[in-house]
Image (cartoon, rainbow, N blue to C red):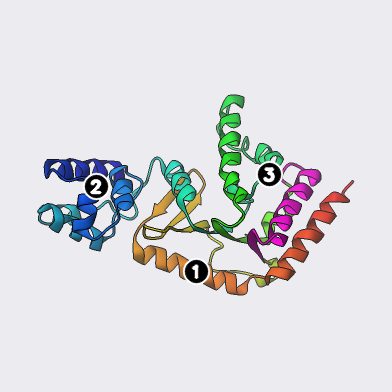
Amino acid sequence: MASVYGNWLKQQREAAGLTQQDLAERALMTRSHISHIEAGRRVPSKDDARRLDRALNTGDVLTNFLPENTAAVADYFESARQLEQQATVIQEFAISFIPGILQTERYARAIIPIGYPPRSAQDCERTIVSRLERGKLLADPVKPVVWAVLDEAVLRRPVGGPEVMAEQLTYIADLVERNRVRAHVMPFALGPHPLMQSMLTLMWFEDQPPVAYTEGLRTGKVHDSPDVVEELQGSYNLALSDALPLRESLDLLRSTAKEFGHHD
């Protein structure tokens, strides 16, 4: 639905003889935001849609035919991946496994083939390569800023076996000690918390509104609605306030890695 909406916007813009920059200036938006809407990667807020209607003299068409917030997005992962590459700030919450951009190669190789129906070796290899490419975001010493809240289950579940887990947790701990990533652990002792129903990624950009991405079994959703993003950000902030402080989280990462490393 988002791609259909984007194609229709592009047709109206071109029919009016406007470039993306022209429309952006008329609608008080950025050109890159217009580009993402037309490509189906973003859905405008209602305020943006009203400004686009005024800029294109389309009445209330763009406003009235906004895709529903609950609509499924078939290419959800690709949309999220592209946004991830543009983000200046990324905040992750992981409930059951290490977030993709923080995974080591051996951890990725252990977790990607899991699922039904079985995946071919070629398909798994493509996904592994893509996931490791995502991790190259961290090669820059400063950008993007990355925060990760990890449920303690993420640290305890032995994906790939003790050696793989020791390596994975040590890798994250090293990133924390280099001030490249901030990682906070949500301890089991806390009990229920605001994010225990789903994984969550929040992303901010230089010239676009922030977005959120949630994912469950065989489903995912990029959220553009400012109200939804604000609500999810509030849930993240609540969870972060209950998580262990950075130093205690680092100590737990190191001690758990050591436990896995000493496993027979």
- On the question of residue 28 being in view, the answer is yes
Q: Which numbered mark, 3 or 2, is in the foreground of this view?
A: 2
Q: Would you call the spot at circle 2 few (<14 residues within 10 Å), some (14-19), or many (20 or more)?
A: some
Give, as a single range, the part of the protein colored magenta.
159-185
Q: Earlier in the sequence, mark 3 or mark 2?
A: 2
Q: Would you call the spot at circle 3 few (<14 residues within 10 Å), some (14-19), or many (20 or more)?
A: many
For mark 1, what is the residue? 235
Distance from disc 3 to disc 1, alpha carbons, whole Å, reads 28 Å
- On the question of residue 118 being in view, the answer is no
Q: Indicate the quadrant where residue 130 lies.
A: top right
Whole-percent x, y for residue 250 in the image: 74, 64
* Rendered position, 97 above or below 15: below
Whole-percent x, y for residue 147 in the image: 58, 61
Residue 175 colored magenta? Answer: yes
Q: Earlier in the sequence, mark 2 or mark 1?
A: 2
| Left or right placement of residue 180 versus residue 81 in this view | right
Q: Earlier in the sequence, mark 3 or mark 1?
A: 3
Q: Where is the N terminus found, in terms of image quarters? A: top left
* Rendered position, 11 above or below 94: above
Q: Nearer the viewer, residue 87 or 72?
A: 87
Name the element at disc 2.
helix
Question: Tag on residue 20?
Answer: 2
For mark 3, what is the residue? 104
Whole-percent x, y for residue 152 in the image: 69, 61
Q: Which numbered mark, 2 or 1, is in the foreground of this view?
A: 2
